Image (cartoon, helix red, strand yellow):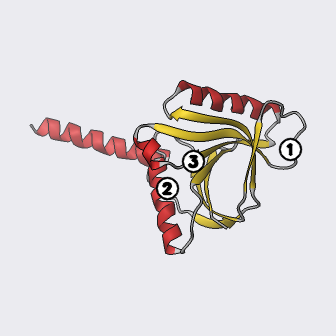
Amino acid sequence: MKKYFVLGAAIVIFGLLINYTLGGFANFEPRLVNVNNYTIYGTAFEGSYKSSDLKETVEKMKKKQQDFNGAADVVIINYFDDDRERIGRVSNFVGLRFHQAEPDSLAGLEKRKIKASHALRTEIKIKPLVMPTPEKIQKKTLALAELEHLHLQNLSIEQYNDSGILVVEFPVQE
């Protein structure tokens, strides 16, 4: 009996140590930032968030991102719809957001513009095993919005850049 207790304790301590090493206990705090609208070129997606079509669309944008030598971030706009999300369906727009002026060669991509001058931003180091869930990020952001008396648009914008940082922004309604 004592042997199993020691073995169990060792496994728990080892697991906690690995989680800590990977950054699993790192805290994240949303903050209010100034933004200058969002212009994104990409493709709409509606369906299951587990769909291979969604993964393929993201991969296609990652390849296009490489064509522009880091001048753009892969972006996913998540439109919130509680009724659809309860049955596992999502409405997204997957595309590229350019750091400077957009290039001329964007044939076949739809342009979407989201007007916003402020957003609540959370930055997270991308480590799939220990990252906070989207629900946890949204919950913490909505709590800050309520505390600051801000009304958010019904969407979030995830930006994946080359440095391994995920930036999630919730635009404030104007």
Q: Nearer the viewer, residue 20 or 6?
A: 20
| Residue 61 placement (x, y as % from top left) | 70, 32
Numbered circle sitting on residue 79: 3
Q: Earlier in the sequence, mark 1 or mark 2?
A: 1
> Measuring 67% from the left and 67% from the top, which residue is drawn there?
174
> Measuring 77% from the left and 34% from the top, which residue is drawn there?
109
Question: Helix, strand, or loop for circle 1?
Answer: loop
Alpha carbon distance from label 3 to label 2:
13 Å
Q: Check disc 2 and report the residue beneath it.
A: 138
> Measuring 49% from the left and 74% from the top, which residue is drawn there?
147
75 vs 153: above or below: above
Circle 1 Cα neighbour tier, 10 Å, few/some/many (<14 / 14–19 / ≥20): some
Q: Earlier in the sequence, mark 1 or mark 3?
A: 3
Question: Helix, strand, or loop for circle 2?
Answer: helix
Q: Nearer the viewer, residue 107 or 136?
A: 107
Numbered circle sitting on residue 59: none
Alpha carbon distance from label 1 to label 2:
30 Å
For badge 3, the amino acid type reads Tyr
Give the mark toward the camera: 1 or 3.
3
37 vs 80: above or below: below
For badge 2, the amino acid type reads Gln
| Residue 104 placement (x, y as % from top left) | 90, 37
Question: Helix, strand, or loop for circle 3?
Answer: strand
For badge 1, the amino acid type reads Glu
Res. 85 in view: yes
Res. 132 in view: no
